[in-house]
Amino acid sequence: MQHLPKFMTYKDHSKAILTLGLPLIGGHLGQIAIGATDTIMVGWFSVEALAAVTLASTYFFVLFIFGSGFAFAIMPMVAAFAAEEDETAIRRATRMGLWLSMAFGLLVLPVMFWSEPILRLLGQSDALASEAAKYLRVAGFGVVPALLVMVLKSYLAALERTQIVLWITLIAAVVNALANYALIFGNWGAPALGVVGAATASVITQSVSLVGVVLYILLIVPQHQLFVRMWRADTQMLLRVFRLGLPIGLTTLSEVGLFAASAVMMGWLGTIPLAAHGIAVQLASITFMVHLGLSNVATIRAGNAYGRRDRAHMARGGIAVIVMSVLFAALTTFVFVGFPEPLIDLFMQDSEPARLQIIAIGTGLLIMAALFQLVDGAQAIALGLLRGVQDTKMPMWMAAFSYWGVGVPSSYLLGFTFGFDGIGVWAGLVLGLGVASVLLNARFWGVTLKKVGPTPPLPDPSALQKAI
């Protein structure tokens, strides 16, 4: 890893953030392209299939993102160990992240397989629950490889090997598109499987991604010997990863659960509102990937600064990444408010009977999505900075309160009690994310950052000029 100078200007930080962050953002966009491809192609198949896959994907993602907490924990740990030049600790942490992720994936497989009665308990219609369960019975087999890929990508990103993270994701996106085209519609001699075809394509994609990232590590980063004696337990490091990763998983689960609850509520309103919700969420998720990539950069760079106990570097980097997030939020707000219809049209055939209804509902939802761009990005960056300094327990409680104490009740009250339907449900999302952004930023800037130290003394001007 390239060692950073002790002092960097905001311009230096911005360049470093873009160098590290653009491949990560590209990787996240490639990942979301996989979901967008599923949504678009299933939407071409039928609106009923689109509603079912929207529901099923939300169900899958809630469980997947909970288990991803261990992968997210690896990123700040490896970044800090790399700053300390402790290769043994890098290997130990990553291995135990793989252990925990595999164990979680195996535990949730039954919940994927027997999802239909759970979806019915959540108030979904028999037809919708049955179709979504068909997807999940196949897609569930991809959760283990997907979680293992997350751990290995976090390991590589923390070592600032972000280019390969991008390329593996882009290859996976191409594989997913081809497999979807074949298996959903029955092209190239394949059977036309509809939602089951989309699920099968996802499992194929996740497996290809795992093979690709493992081969890269074996060939290019052999010095860490990640897969040598993988069976050997390391209880001390396993507990350390678990203690850091569980709060991260629960925090992320709280946020994703907020969006999952909104999908369930939209399902109560009917198939067409749920289909419109699926399109709007997909578009909002695409733009959120930029904020998530910047959040990952914040985690890596804060983790590196934390390993060196460099408070000044961490603070300047944090400000720089927040400014970038705000600028991008302003751009996406303009696009969502200014061009909603052509964006929504991407997900439907012109001949779709419910097209005008979906556009009408989706346009209002995109306006609400534009409103929460700023607060969603702000809370994501704050979480990234807090994870970088391995502060995860209090943020977990703040997130739970914001998303479930404020967001979910507000969505229900505004959507159903006050009768604003889908717009009200999404307004609740804005309120929950807004409270989270205020609390999490106050935690980092008002409490956590002050505990990082001692701040290294700045060099004299002549030495500084030479360093830069």
Image: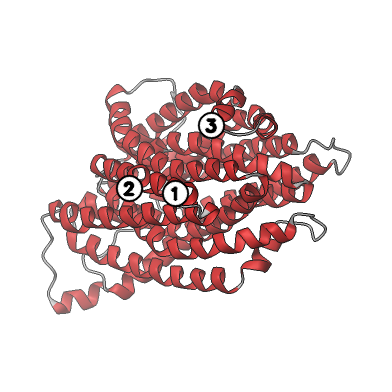
**Identity of the residue drawn at 40% across and 53% down:** 296
The residue that mark 2 highlights is: 402
Total of numbered circles in the picture?
3
- The disc placed on residue 122 is 3
Q: Distance between the residues labelled 1 and 3?
A: 16 Å
Q: Could you tell whether 186 is left or right of 137 in the image?
A: right
Earlier sequence position, callout 2 versus callout 3: 3
Q: How far apart are marks 2 and 3 (CA)?
A: 22 Å
Estimate the x, y position of residue 243 in percent, counting from the top left: 28, 32
Estimate the x, y position of residue 17 in percent, counting from the top left: 38, 64
Q: How far apart are marks 1 and 2 (CA)?
A: 12 Å
The residue that mark 1 highlights is: 411
Figure check: 461 above or below 446: below
Residue 27 appearing in the image? no
Q: What residue type is labelled 2?
A: Ser
**Identity of the residue drawn at 39% across and 41% down:** 254
- SS label for mark 1: helix
Farthest residue in the right direction? 189
Q: In which quarter of the image is the N terminus?
A: bottom left
Q: Could you tell whether 304 is left or right of 409 in the image?
A: left
| Dot 3 alpha-carbon crowd within 10 angstroms: few under 14, some 14 to 19, many 20 or more | some
Give the mark toward the camera: 2 or 3: 3
**Identity of the residue drawn at 89% across and 39% down:** 189
Q: Are marks 1 and 2 in contact (CB under 8 Å)?
A: no
Earlier sequence position, callout 1 versus callout 3: 3
Give the mark toward the camera: 1 or 2: 1
- SS label for mark 2: helix
Q: In which quarter of the image is the C terminus?
A: bottom left
Camera-nearest residue between 14 and 43: 43
Camera-nearest residue between 106 and 19: 106
